[in-house]
Image: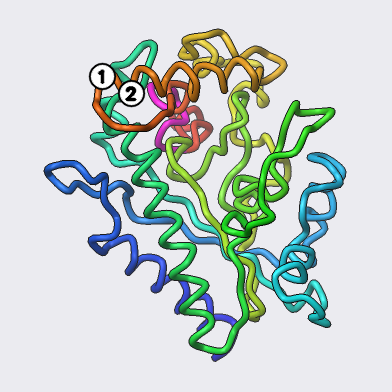
Amino acid sequence: MGRAENAKWLEGIIREFINSPANSLQNEARERAWEDPLVGFSSGDDLLYTEFKEHVGPFHWTPREIFSLTYPGSEIASEQLTVISWVLPQTSETKKNNVREKVFPAERWVRARMFGEMTNDGLRRHVVAALGEKGFRAVAPCLSPEWGMRPSERFTFSSNWSERHAAYASGLGTFGLCRGLITPKGKAMRVGSVVAEIPIAPTTRQYTDHRQWCLFYVDGSCRECAKRCPVGAISDEGTDKLKCREHSIEKASEFVKSRFGFEGYGCGLCQTGVPCESRVPLKLKKSG
């Protein structure tokens, strides 16, 4: 298959999985966790991946580094690799539920964070397996046993592969004040990616700056995500990761267990009830 055919085939693989019973909140109604995905591609030799090492930290993998770690001894050039990235938008009901919350997340949001991420992991494995059946070696970086968080002088802590940064490189969105990724389907979503030895043309990025779709960084307006944060972790300087983590994981896990009766955590208040919840807010501003 050619590059265009490869892209179309992979998009179909991803959409088929998300439209299967595997996409579930695992509640009584067996509601789907995610709406239809967005899919983008970037080249393994995209200079952004080298810039991420400078911006995030030297520990952040390039596509070639995680591929070589997975397939030791591989003599492969960066340009032979493609990063396949996807966005999984939250459902309208999940977003509607979370908008009403002021301190802790709604049950649907927690289910999306826990069981929806299990769907995302399943999709990562499914894409790697489908590629393998066609003879293309691949790896899902976030499923690698070597993946994890690292201390970061600039960002307190960061992972050695960022799904959001891969999505940014793959034309799927830019960063907002709360450091969430604003995509054409908004910021209320999760992302995933696979690095594969397959030829695909990169997705054209509809932006030239990593903050281009955030109203705050465009003209200093909005700040709605900061207003929504129940612990004041978001300021004009960005997000206090320690405050955010303490609330969304440590305190929220206690709340989820006592309120909903299962193990889980999350928050997402800064991703809902804001102009960028379900779209790029600049389009609204221009048409208003």
Which amino acid, by three-letter code, is at mark 2?
Val
Using the image as rendered, state which of residue 198 and residue 285 is in the foreground.
Answer: 198
Helix, strand or loop for disc 1: helix
Q: Quadrant of residue 83?
A: bottom right
Q: List the single residue furthest toward the left.
A: 29
Mark 2 burial class by Cα count in 10 Å: few <14, some 14-19, many 20+: many
Q: Quadrant of the C terminus?
A: top left
Image vertical order of residue 108 relative to residue 76, above or below: above
Q: Check if residue 36 falls in the magenta segment.
A: no
**Seen in the image, is 175 located left or right of residue 6?**
right
Q: Residue at x 45, y 38 (%)?
A: 186
**Seen in the image, is 106 located left or right of residue 205?**
left
Which amino acid, by three-letter code, is at mark 1?
Arg
Q: Where residue 3 sits: x, y (%)?
A: 59, 82
Q: Are marks 2 and 1 in contact (CB under 8 Å)?
A: yes
Q: Check if residue 278 falls in the magenta segment.
A: yes
Using the image as rendered, state which of residue 85 and residue 206 is in the foreground.
Answer: 85
Q: Residue at x 65, y 16 (%)?
A: 220
Helix, strand or loop for disc 2: helix
What scheme was used to colour the molecule?
rainbow
Image vertical order of residue 70 relative to residue 279, above or below: below
Q: Where residue 39 sits: x, y (%)?
A: 49, 61
**Seen in the image, is 261 located left or right of residue 5?**
left
Which labelled disc corresponds to residue 256?
2
Mark 1 burial class by Cα count in 10 Å: few <14, some 14-19, many 20+: few
Q: Residue at x 23, y 34 (%)?
A: 93
Residue denoted by label 1: 259
> Distance of mark 2 from mark 1, alpha carbons?
5 Å
Image vertical order of residue 71 relative to residue 208, above or below: below
Segment colored magenta: 272-279
